[in-house]
Image (tube, grey):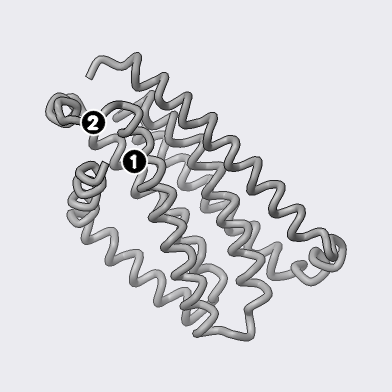
């Protein structure tokens, strides 16, 4: 599994232009609106999903799947790499945003919860789709990025305006609500991993 992670990191290293754009956007959002910086986690997740499309190209998969790992290990590594890397980036962006704009801690904390849940659920949905559709997912991925960008922008705007009222209504139940949704998201991820493994087993690579 370590070899698969290094393979993915090598691919990510080749995406220097996109990573530079994300860095520039991070600086811009920190200057203008700290809460927007967490939205970049969604874009980063979409970027990492492209490793699946790259791996499953015919010319690459013929080599990759001759290496000594099982398809189960491949699926596990993909979930760990895509979701784990994105969550690490999200927490890092949150910490930087808090330092730069401490007056927005409440909004940033609420937005962090929304983004983490979004990453859980969309990983569960998008990874099996990417394995199933492969290179044909490219167009769909673009559409999904636009939709996610729009939804996240709406959520950010809504949270900025109503986060105090929202927290007041939920009151002490916020940890329970978030925890329940997080547990459900983890269950969806477990089901998603089984679905992904089943799809990959049926593919001739």
Q: Earlier in the sequence, mark 2 or mark 1?
A: 2
Apparent side of residue 80 relative to residue 94 in the rendered image (left or right): left
Q: Quadrant of residue 67?
A: top left
Q: Is residue 177 above or below residue 109?
A: above
Badge 2: how crowded within 10 Å, few (<14), some, or many (20+)? few
Q: Is residue 83 above or below residue 115?
A: above
Badge 1: how crowded within 10 Å, few (<14), some, or many (20+)? some
Q: Are marks 2 and 1 in contact (CB under 8 Å)?
A: yes
Please tell me which residue is depicted at 29% across the width and 62% down the height of the picture. Answer: 19
Mark 1, secondary structure of its residue: helix
Q: Position of residue 147 (x, y in %)?
A: 53, 45
Please give the residue where the numbered disc 2 appears in the rendered image. Answer: 69
Please give the residue where the numbered disc 1 appears in the rendered image. Answer: 77
Q: Is residue 23 above or below residue 59?
A: below
Q: Quadrant of the C terminus?
A: top left
Mark 2, secondary structure of its residue: loop
Please tell me which residue is depicted at 56% across the width and 55% down the height of the picture. Answer: 116
Please tell me which residue is depicted at 41% across the width and 50% down the height of the picture. Answer: 45
> In this orientation, which residue lies closer to the viewer: 80 or 140?
80
Apparent side of residue 97 relative to residue 181 in the rendered image (left or right): left
Please tell me which residue is depicted at 47% across the width and 74% down the height of the picture. Answer: 29
Q: Position of residue 8 (x, y in %)?
A: 24, 47
């Amino acid at each position: 599994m370590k070899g698969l992670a290094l393979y993915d990191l090598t691919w990510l290293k080749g995406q220097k232009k996109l990573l530079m754009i994300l860095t520039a956007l991070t600086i811009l959002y920190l200057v203008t609106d700290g809460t927007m910086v967490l939205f970049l986690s969604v874009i980063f997740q979409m970027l990492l999903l492209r490793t699946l499309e790259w791996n499953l190209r015919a010319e690459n998969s013929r080599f990759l799947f001759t290496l000594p790992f099982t398809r189960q290990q491949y699926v596990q590594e993909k979930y760990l790499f895509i979701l784990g890397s994105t969550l690490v980036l999200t927490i890092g962006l949150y910490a930087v945003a808090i330092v730069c704009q401490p007056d927005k801690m409440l909004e940033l904390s609420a937005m962090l919860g929304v983004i983490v849940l979004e990453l859980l659920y969309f990983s569960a949905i998008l990874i099996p789709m990417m394995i199933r559709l492969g290179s044909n997912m490219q167009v769909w991925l673009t559409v999904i990025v636009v939709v996610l960008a729009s939804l996240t922008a709406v959520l950010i705007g809504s949270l900025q305006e109503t986060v105090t009222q929202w927290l007041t209504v939920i009151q002490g139940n916020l940890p329970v609500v978030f925890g329940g949704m997080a547990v459900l998201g983890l269950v969806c991820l477990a089901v998603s991993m089984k679905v992904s493994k089943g799809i990959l087993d049926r593919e001739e690579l």
